[in-house]
Image: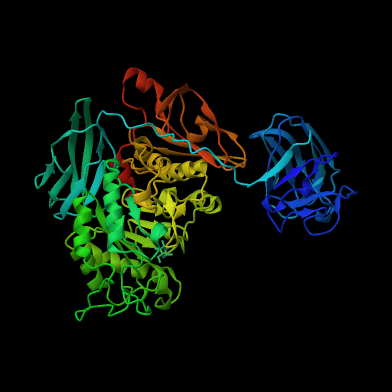
Amino acid sequence: MAVRAAETGVGLENLDLTRMTCGWAKPMANRNVRGGELRIGGRTFDRGVGTHAESLIRLRLPAGPVRLRAWVGVDDAAGAGRGSVEFRVLGDGRCRWSSGLMRGGDPAQRVELDVTGVRELVLRVTDGGDETTDDLANWADAVLETAGGAVETLEPIPVEAREIRTPPPVPTPRFHGAAVVGVRPGRPFRSTIAVRGERPIALHAEGLPAGLALDGARRCIEGRAPADSGVYEATLIASNAHGVARRRWRLVVGEQLALTPPMGWNSWNCFGARISQELIEATARAMAAERLHELGWTYVVIDDGWQRHPDSDDPALAGPERDPRGRLLPNRRFPDLRALVDTIRGLGFKAGIYSSPGPITCAGHTGSHGREAEDAAQFADWGFEYLKYDWCSYSRIARGTTLPEQMRPYQRMAALLARQPSDIVFSICQYGVGNVSAWGRAAGGHLWRTTGDIEDTWESVRRIGFGQAGLDLFAGPGGWNDPDMLVIGHLGWGQPLRPSRLTPNEQYLHMTLWCLLAAPLMLGCDMTRLDDFTRGLITNGEVLDVNQDPLGRAASRVAVRGPTQVWARPLEDGSVAVGLFNLDEEPMEVEARWSDIGIVGAWSVRDLWRGRDLGASTNGWTITVARHGAELLRLSPADAIASNSPPRVPWTWEADARDRR
Ligand code: GLA
């Protein structure tokens, strides 16, 4: 809605207040947010807008001279000394005026501001740095004086340019994905080597243990793992017309799998339970066509909806849940699971499947209760290499909510999986109930969901992502906190697909944080419809390398300053990955101080998203970070780079893994 200025200008109360955000109730024209008269510091105003922190209205201003006049303050209805807010006026992303902290009873403050030349004006009320109780905030007598042009109310979420930060891939060979891989003694082994660069690339391996061989054409190491536990080290060499890359590759034979966080795709966020063999196959083919295996994307996981549905009248889903021998039957949308698994494998990926320890899954399909042994064997027999095991209806079975009862179904399935002739990564899903991070590994999980289901909203990503603070100690090779799947690209949960509702900067923040957290990276979007922006988000080798770093240390939150946060994690080569986050509604300077990270001396700074060296510093690095945005840096000891000497931080994977056992 655009409102043309009368002689006295445009009153804020006449604008489209349905587009104004408000932390409680809704904005009121000429009244406070509770419906009473607008009063600030004992003074009554006839006109204006009563709102409640956090609140924001975004306006498009006309060309020509524009002035903002207003009185602001906490409404007297809050009570003297109660509530605490800050009024801020932003012009094209920059703060033009701030009230400082105001409380109930404070006299109204006058705003008199020339905003000529500003295109987008934001009137914002913050919570003043605490929570929002009694934060009744008034923009009283608020008028935009223009030379007659219209003032337009915009959506509160800004339209951001879909900046593609990821540079195009370089032609020289580069390895990505897991450089350290776990396998049980004597088990069949197959691992796609993630290597990028201009084709043709010649691949060689030196020092592979007996029983394993490299298939250079299929870019895969295959065979049977050694019978003896231990770390087997080899060198992979990739060469093409532009150069040579070498990778130290370690096979860790023992009881641990998933030595780096699993990366892949899962059907749920995209298709919900409306899945079929064709959809999954089309996904795997699209992932191969996008060459995602060259970056370490590995699993194609079928989530809920592949089994029969005992209560459904849909003939494709109805029918016997198991065959006469008790074996779980897929529904008619999956005519040949074994063939599907083979296709996925042939494309260079691994297949994953889903079940529940309860009698039915969350979407009402058949679960594994009472048939765990048959199902574990069946999954292995079909060739699946990953199982997501979702609590769902298990509450009907559990005898209470004690820790042993919570662990029991997972321990049982983990033990059964470990007995199968081939390795299966085990994903625990029980929505983060009962501090699962502390026992997920002991229950046999290789990853465990730490939260309820994620959504493609800022609120969800912020709450879940930053809510991981403090869980880093539980993550490490063989066991990962899982803050749920990625919500980028085209999503839909079974409804018509639509682009993620996250803004571009929120999507950078999401990927940056998940990589730092050493979170499993599970895409949840339609892979047949990747746009250039999403492609950039998921094909940045340097960013993904942080997630897959062999040291496997999840980032910890090292600083919180107002709405900004800094997270850091040490990497195996002695460098440090650092995330600078801005949770605010406007761009903010975020400072990573070396003292926060616990490092001293000169460190070189690389911008990982843009693949650019930024310089070096002895005390810290500051970047202006976009609203709800993030930057990802890699710090390397500057003197080590200059002298080519090894890094001074003596982290090694073996020592670290030992400490964690
Ligand atoms: C739960 C899980 C989701 C998904 C659905 C399937 O909600 O948390 O990730 O697997 O069940 O029904």
Q: Is residue 174 in view from this perspective?
A: yes
547 in relation to 638, above or below: below
- Way the structure is coloured: rainbow
Total numbered labels placed on residues in the image: 0
In this rendering, is residue 269 above or below 470?
below
The picture quadrant where one finds residue 539 is top left
Percent coordinates x, y for residue 472 in the rendering: 43, 48
Q: Quadrant of residue 653?
A: top left
Say which of 660 and 55 sits in front.
55
Above-or-below relation of 606 to 584: above
Horizontal relation, residue 202 to residue 15: left or right: left
Q: Is residue 567 or residue 271 the one in the foreground?
A: 271
Choose top left, top right, bottom left or bottom right for residue 408: bottom left
- What percent of the width, then of the height, locates residue 473? 42, 49
The residue positioned 49% from the left and 53% from the top of the image is 456
The residue at the point 82 percent across, 51 percent down is 75
In the picture provided, is 644 more to the left or to the right than 619?
left
Question: Relative to 423, is 312 on the left or the right?
Answer: right
Rendering coords of residue 387 (x, y %)? 30, 61
Task: Please identify the residue farthest to the left as the structure is shown.
Answer: 210
Name above or below for residue 582 compared with residue 268. above
Task: Confirm whether residue 136 shows in the render.
Answer: no
- Is residue 173 rendered to the left or right of residue 612? left
Ligand 1 resides in the quarter of the picture at bottom left
Residue 450: x and y in percent read 44, 57
Q: In the orientation shown, which residue stands out farthest toward the top?
A: 643
577 vs 404, nearest the viewer: 577
